[in-house]
Image: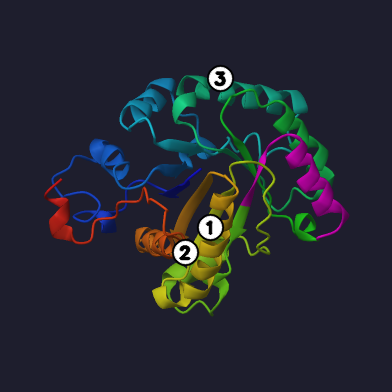
Amino acid sequence: MKIHYGMAQWQHPAWVNWLYPTSLPTGERLGRYSQVFSTVEVGSTFYTKVDDAQLLRWYESVADGFKFSFKAPQTVTHRLLERPWHEVQQDWLAFMLSLQPLQNKLGPTMLQFPAVCDERALDVILALCDMWTLSSPLSVEVRNLAYFDKNQTEQRFLAGLSDRNVNRVIMDSRPVFSTDAYCESLIDAQKKKPRVPCHPVVTARHPVVRFIGHPDLPRNELWLDQWAKKLSQWLSAGLTSSVFVHSSDNIAAPTLAAQLDEKVRLLNPHYQSALALPQSQEQVTLW
C-alpha cells in the first residue's frame, strides 16, 4: 500500500534548474523526473501511436518502482460512437499488445471518455473493460454528467467497474473553477478541464485521482486537506493510490503534490513518503 504521485508530463520549461539541471539533455529528463516522482500520466498515446522502440526506451529509463499510466488511444475512447465496433476492438487490442512488455512498470492504464459518451455508452465502456487482459490495473474516466447523478446510471457504472476490478478515475477540478478566470492559464484551464462533481468512490484496489489545482497556491488548502484525509483512509484500507497533480499551467503542480504529501505525512506518523521534491535549485546541481 502506498501513494504514487505524478504529473501529467515529465518535463516543463519552468522545471529546468529545479527538477533537473539546465545541462541535462532532454532525453534524460524522464529518468531524472523518476527520481522525484513515482508515476506519470502519459497523454501522447492518446493522440498518436507511439512506436514500440520508444515505449521501451521510456521503460528502460526509469527504476523498477516507477509506474506509467498511459492513456488509451482516442480512436478507442473519443471516437467510440462514430466507428464500427470491430475497429474499436482492434485498436484496443493493439494498444494492449504494445503495453505487454511494459507490465512491470505499468500503473493504472486510463480509458478516458468525453462528455458525448452518455449513459447509452455504458455497456460499450464495460465491454472494453471486459477485454482488458494485462496484469496491471485499468481505470476509467467519464465526463458526462449522467455518471454523476448518484442514482441509477452512476450506480450501474460503479457496480460495473467494481465487478470487473476496474478503478474509477476521480477528477477534482473544483480548485481551478473556484474563481473567475482572471489570467490566461485559468482561462485556458477552464475551457479545457471538465467541470464535473468530485465523487471519491473507490471501485478497485488502485484508485486514481486527477487533481487540478488553482495557480494561487493558498486557495488549494481546503481541497488538499480533504484529499490528505481521503488518501490516509485509503492507506489504512491497504489501497495503492495514483495521484496526478495538475495546475492551470502545470508550473506549480510539483509544489502542490509536495504540499499534499506533507499533509498526508502529518496525519500518518508512520507514513514513509516516496516523493523527493528538491527544496532549492542549488540542490539539483548536487544530484
What residue lies at 53% left-to-right and 47% top-to-bottom?
Answer: 241
- Mark 2 and mark 1 lie on one chain; the one further toward the N terminus is 1
Q: Which residue is mark 1?
A: 232
Q: Is residue 81 visible?
A: no
- Residue 42 % position (x, y): 46, 41
- Residue 15 % position (x, y): 27, 55
- Residue 160 % position (x, y): 79, 40
* Callout 3 amino acid: Leu
Q: Is residue 201 visible?
A: yes
Instruction: Pick the residue in front: 228 or 97.
Output: 228
- Which numbered dot is residue 267? 2
Whether residue 230 is in magenta: the answer is no
Real-space Cα separation, disc 3 to disc 1, in angstroms: 35 Å
Cβ–Cβ below 8 Å for labels 2 and 1? yes
Q: Compared with residue 29, is residue 283 higher up or lower down, i.e. above or below?
A: below
Region of the chain picked out in magenta, as a range: 150-169
| Colour pattern of the rendering | rainbow
| Magenta span dominant secondary structure | helix
What residue lies at 43% left-to-right and 24% top-to-bottom?
Answer: 51
- Mark 2 and mark 3 lie on one chain; the one further toward the N terminus is 3
Instruction: Pick the residue in front: 162 or 29.
Output: 162
Q: Compared with residue 240, is residue 147 higher up or lower down, i.e. above or below?
A: below
**Left or right relative to 191: residue 129:** right
What residue lies at 44% left-to-right and 36% top-to-bottom?
Answer: 67
**Left or right relative to 4: residue 120:** right
